[in-house]
Amino acid sequence: MNLRYPTLAIVALLGSLAAQGTIDSPSVPFNPQGNNIPIGSPRLRYMQWYAASEFTAVQTKPIRITGFAFRAAPNAGGQAGRTIELEVTMGNSLPFQASGSFEGNFTSGRTVVFPRARVNTSAATPGSYPVRINFVNEFVWDGQSGVALDLRIYDNGNSNVAFAYDLEFHPVTQNRLLRLYTVNDPNSAFAAFGPQAAGITTRFFYNEAITVQYGTGCAGEGGFVPSATVSGGLPIPGNGAYTFELRNCSSQRPAVFFIGGSNTTWGSFSLPYALGIIGAPGCSVLAEPLASARLMTVGGGPGAGLALFPFPMPANTGYLGAWFYAQWAVLDPNSPNGGLAMSNGLWLVPALQ
């Protein structure tokens, strides 16, 4: 059917209203003890790697991670906090292992989530989370990878002298967590210690509303591959500014925006569905075309074309819990295949936040 009005009329599944959540790692406890690294140690570069299974046990879709906290050791005994200076980076990583190269453990999505600044840690009392970092820049976990959490501590708040500040430490993690670090050099490229099958208990905080790109499109005129993206914020109920965008395409060309509830099936067809059979080699349908809208691109020539499709999110919440997949097709006689260009896909996960 056509989308005469920008609405989620295709919704057929009702879901939960979950929006915010936490992921605790390790998900299985291993006789926790206490360790003062990284907060109570001299300045250092410290990375903790988390297996993909630690996240997929809780979530099976991309999420926006907004912060983390370290848990105090069972016998911490009220050890005083400090003012420390640090920078925090997160990224997607290898799902089953980590290496001794700090930067080498980032495979995609590397984000400086907390630029270098001073923060106050609380007293490390048993059962508390005295080290909590709320991110300045959210990190998008891709829904399938491991995760690398990188701390560069430039000032430990104690004249670079180690002090008692024990966090809950697991000396045996069955490779669910790994840690690596170098003391006295927060800019070290390689770890002097690790990767070790050990780590600090961590709680990650996340929100669910997200739109992420997936798959690859095929080129139009001039070799430009159309890009599907969004503007106007997140897919949150009542967000009237949410808009699908098509960019990097030819101008003055008919375009079709389509959306559906699957990126794996389209009726009896499996997705992605290659369109070489209709004379468009290299192009594939990445999203179920359950509903569509026809537009005309505007702009100044090959690669400068664009189209906007406003898609105000309904204020009701009945569609939360369902996922949607969208894509653009451009009728382009000057494309390399002589007729069609396609964008990447968009994975839309509506939620409260």
Image (cartoon, grey):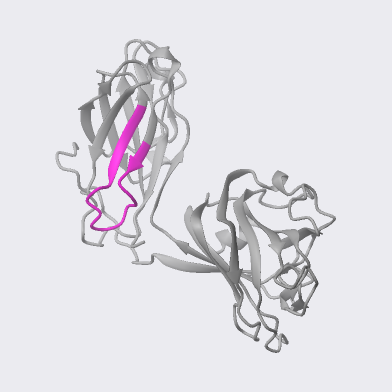
- In the image, is 242 to the left or to the right of 195? left
Image position of 344 with respect to 25: above or below: above
Image position of 78 with respect to 40: above or below: below
- The part of the chain drawn in magenta is 229-247
Pinpoint residue 227: horizontal percent, then vertical percent: 40, 30
Of all residues, the one furthest to the front in this rendering is 159
Image position of 98 with respect to 277: above or below: below
Of all residues, the one furthest to the left in this rendering is 4
Of all residues, the one furthest to the bottom in this rendering is 77
Task: Mark yes or no: residue 268 visible.
Answer: no
Pinpoint residue 232: horizontal percent, then vertical percent: 30, 46
- In the image, is 195 to the left or to the right of 214? right
Pinpoint residue 217: horizontal percent, then vertical percent: 44, 27
Quarter occupied by the C terminus: bottom left
Taking the spot 43% from the left edge, 20% from the top edge, the residue there is 224
Q: Does residue 230 belong to the magenta stretch?
A: yes
Taking the spot 38% from the left edge, 44% from the top edge, the residue there is 262
Foreground pick, 226 / 160 = 160
